[in-house]
Amino acid sequence: MGKMMSSLFRHPSGRIGLVIIGLYLLAAILGTLGLTPHDPLKLFAIDRLKAPSQTYWFGTDLLGRDAFSRLMVGIRQSMLIAFASVAIATIAGTIIGLLSAWWGGIWDGIFMRVMDVLLAFPAILLALLIIAIVGPGTMTSVAAIAIVYTPIFARVVRGPALSLKQRDFVDAARTFGSSQGYVLTRHLLLNLVAPLVVQVTLALAWALLTEAGLSFLGLGTQPPTPSLGLMLAESRNLMTHAPWLMIFPAVTIMLGILGFNLTGDALRDILDPRTQRREA
Amino acid sequence: MTGLLSVRDLRVGFGQNPKANEVVKGVSFDLGPGETLGIVGESGSGKSVSALSINRLVDFGGGRITHGSIQLTRSDGTVLDVAKADEKTLLGIRGRDVGMIFQEPMTSLNPVHTVGAQIEEAFRLSKGLTGAQAHKATLDVLGRVRIPDAQSRLGYYPHQLSGGMRQRIMIAMALAASPRVLIADEPTTALDVTVQAQIMALLAELREETGMAMIFITHDIGLVAGIADRIMVMQNGVAVEQGETDGVLDNPQHDYTRHLLRAVPHFTSGKAVRDDGRRAEQQEPIVKVDNLVVRFPVGKAWFKPKGAIHAVDGVSFDLVPGETLAIVGESGCGKSTTARALLGLNSKTRGEIVTEAGRSVRPVQMVFQDPFASLNPRLNVEALLAEPAIANGQRRDDALRERMTFLLDRVGLPQDALTRYPHQFSGGQRQRLCIARALMLNPDVVVLDEAVSALDVSVQAKVLELLVDLQQEFGLAYLFISHDMAVVERIAHRIAVMFAGQIVELGEARAVLSDPQHSYTKRLIAAVPAIERRKQRFAVDMTQVPSLVRPPGFEPSPAQWREAGDDHRVRVEDTP
Amino acid sequence: MSYVVQRLLTFPLILLGVSILVFVAIRLVPGDAITAMLGTEAGLLTPVQRETLAAYFGIDQPIWAQYLRWLTGLFQGDLGISSIYGKPVLTVILERFPLTLQLSLMSMVIALSVGVPLGVLAASRNERPSDLVVRVLAMLGQSTPNFVVGILIIYVLSVFFGFVPAMGTFTPLFTDPLASIAQLIFPAITLGFAFAASVTRISRSAMLDVLSDDYVRTARSKGASPMSVIWHHALPNALIPVVTLSGVEFGYLLGGAVIVEQIFALPGLGRLVLDAITQRDYALVQGTVLFIAFNFLVVNLLVDLAYVALDPRIRIGRR
């Protein structure tokens, strides 16, 4: 793990990605601890729609709330939802994909057809369907994004798991009589860590995007809790008068997604068996 | 200059700093019109890179010529230094002056174009032929590479043809441009030995017909003995020896050439078989296989099976302690399926496999072909070696660690290997690890499925020696699966020849190799290249392996056997 | 051919699964089915009215019987009645669908015609400055959500050009093709932006893989020109993953239309879904979701068939 981090840091886009993720995590932690420049919910009535200044770094909104503090809490909200949903999707998808590949036959057919049904919905539509049933909110966003990405993880795991199952070292394990549990964890799962790490990083980027999209539509995090998507949506009618209200949330969303995409790409480069072979 | 091609002090490097990363370190050679030069070397010797420099394809693999000259006499009599030519000039060289065929016929043809279109393209590029002219020329050239039914093959895609056929297509494509030099980069390495013989015969005939010069690259010095006028031996980017074929083979000057000729297995028609561990009378077999049948249903997704692949059809043999039985045959003959059935990796359709209770709960262990694929890359050596023991209820204690270090030492690996990972070892070392792992449970029988085939020839020889030592020390019986007759000759006590899922000949190794009886065994042995067989001419023989897919309910007629010696049985052939 | 047959066989199976999922999902709405069907109006009903309605809609029957009844209705094109519009759901959907279809197709054309050439260019100039520029742009493009692109486009157009993209009523393609395309051009760019970026990236990496394949070396050994190597030998092979991606991405386009239609105030299918959800018109939610999923599946099937046409290894088995 430490080795991976250091080679990630040597990779040009990995370094940029890590720095961005680090800053966002810092902002999220400070936002959680309440260490923001101002109270993100407090209305400074006399300072409405102020341009960025030394007091209000990113300006204030229509109600006179500090945009920078609200962005910090928004980042926390986005990261929380992204990490929680991706964690659930990773665990569920890995278990389904692994067992599907290992058992094969009829179980594989059933599992993968169910995943196909979930994949038949465009991601945001499936999330919207879930929100339509349960109603919007933070927990709904987590559940919706987790359900949307579970089949993707199941597929990502199943493909390599199927090819690992055919590998000679699994055959060798069968000739010694190794237990199923040993083969599944040591021979399959351990070799799936690399593709999973890449996929998790990229899924975090998608999850950020989906979350921002849902709250942009007003169906994600509900006010008054600040969220990046909603801040951007609210800025629309004011964009000619207060463009900072649009620019800062837009850049914050983009940078966050970019950070995870860059890191994921770098990880793929580093963990790609082809580039590894070239180094060896 | 009278030669066709003259290479002087060629140096080729790779990467950011090609001068510091040289793979070819000052190679010089000449090639006259109509002459054939064999370049021999193991992987990493720089033989392919040298050849790819002649048409500068090496540039596309990241290589740079850092020094030297490549003087090529073109068809109009002008001389060009290829090493300094620009890309535009090179386009005119490739195909027209220098043609090339490659090692992997499976991947060297474009999968989305028909073979006809690919050959026609070669005619268009080199001679400007299009339409009906190109079509006719393509038919002609397919005839010249002895492809039957050429008209219909034109519309085939590469994946519809066998490896041997694809290599013929590659040759046809190179011939289309009537090159003055043909570079053949290990053109037969991926092919079965009888197909190899056919391709070699074809190349020899075409050389006579066209008078083109040829550079033939191979790791098998026995193979060039049959075709080359001159031989150049390469090691670590340097040409260590070159000269007339007979001179190099009969009177080698350099140690490495001597090593390649003496230490590396070469086929000698049974003269080099082992004379230890002959089977004693009345010895009880440890493994007895009786009428083994393995079939794989085909097309079973649809209602009822269309038939089955008869991968193994009625195979019987036995194996006594301390003995090596080699099963030889070409790809698809069922030899690996037989081995895997013995370990329970393929379920058998019928038949009996009886293993005597031996020294261990799992008396049969296996070593696989590919040492890269058979070791889990994420586990260290300690975990890899401990796996069989743990799987069978042993504890990870000092006794186990002692056994691991003992076996590591025995297969010639250092003690500190325990904490290392597979990628830190070479191919030969990995195969030693696999052997150590197979011995962890103290088995009676080890199945070696093409266990040395993926290794370089010098490494092969050392691993074979190790296997013989281990056999004597631990009283192991080996079931040695291989396609390589030279290797089999060095290790087998008895040989079973498999063809199309059946054993066609079985007996004592010397008898089978020196006096083959079955027509297939004869064909197989005649096709094996050997140093003694210089300038040998093969008849171009187009015999194809029969399809193994049979309709449902098909049963082969029971085998009739005839005794050809004390321990030498031959399957009686149907007289057509 | 068995690959095609297999795809055609699983298609109705998945469609059935999708219909079950959508049906069950709507039953999971908190509160009873009458509320689910009529939305907020249900609060005004008397108990007797409720029972009559329950019998009328067949809600007093077991769930599987209800599902079969609903499914039979689907086959006859009966998706229920929208409570917002007071019209059959299918009618409402078919009014809105042309816009969304045109929007998705336009963004697909934009994405492919920008992405494939850029990807091929980057691959053929691997590690040179033009490759790096394309890679950075593609990475930025992929990381920019479509709502950010949309808002930035509107901002730039209105602030610097004093121009507001035509919103509101949609001019159908057959009424006035130019006006129709002009109206959707900015929304299509918005929707196709990230897609173009991923097409670029996939084309580039597929091209790089293919360019190191043995048959490309063979083509070069014949003396084929660099142009011929790229366009004739490499691209047909590299297109295979691009086609696969396009099928998957078409679903994102249909989904992305929800957001883009919202930003540009276009009366398409995506807006319809949003309105249905916010106004709790469950029959409409059910219908639109099912309709979009159905279209996505059909497109994916078509893409798979295109894939077969491109790759002779699948089209023609071994002989």
Image (spheres, coloured by chain):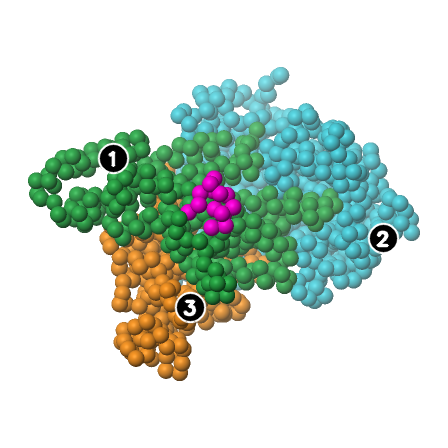
Chain colours: A orange, B cyan, C green
The residue singled out by tag 3 in the image is: A240
SS under mark 2: strand
The answer to which image quadrant residue B545 occupies is top right
Residue C213 vertical position relative to residue C154 in the rendered view, above or below: above
| Amino acid tagged 3 | Thr
The residue singled out by tag 1 in the image is: C70
Gap between marks 2 and 3 measured at Cα: 68 Å
Q: Is circle 2 on the same chain as circle 3? A: no
Q: Is circle 2 on the same chain as circle 1? A: no
Numbered label attached to residue B80:
2
Residue A24 vertical position relative to residue B453 in the rendered view, above or below: below
Q: Which residues are magenta?
A: C170-183
Gap between marks 2 and 1 measured at Cα: 80 Å
Residue drawn at (84%, 48%) of the image:
B31
Few, some or many residues within 10 Å of mark 1 (<14, 14–19, 20+): some
Write down the chain letter for disc 2.
Answer: B
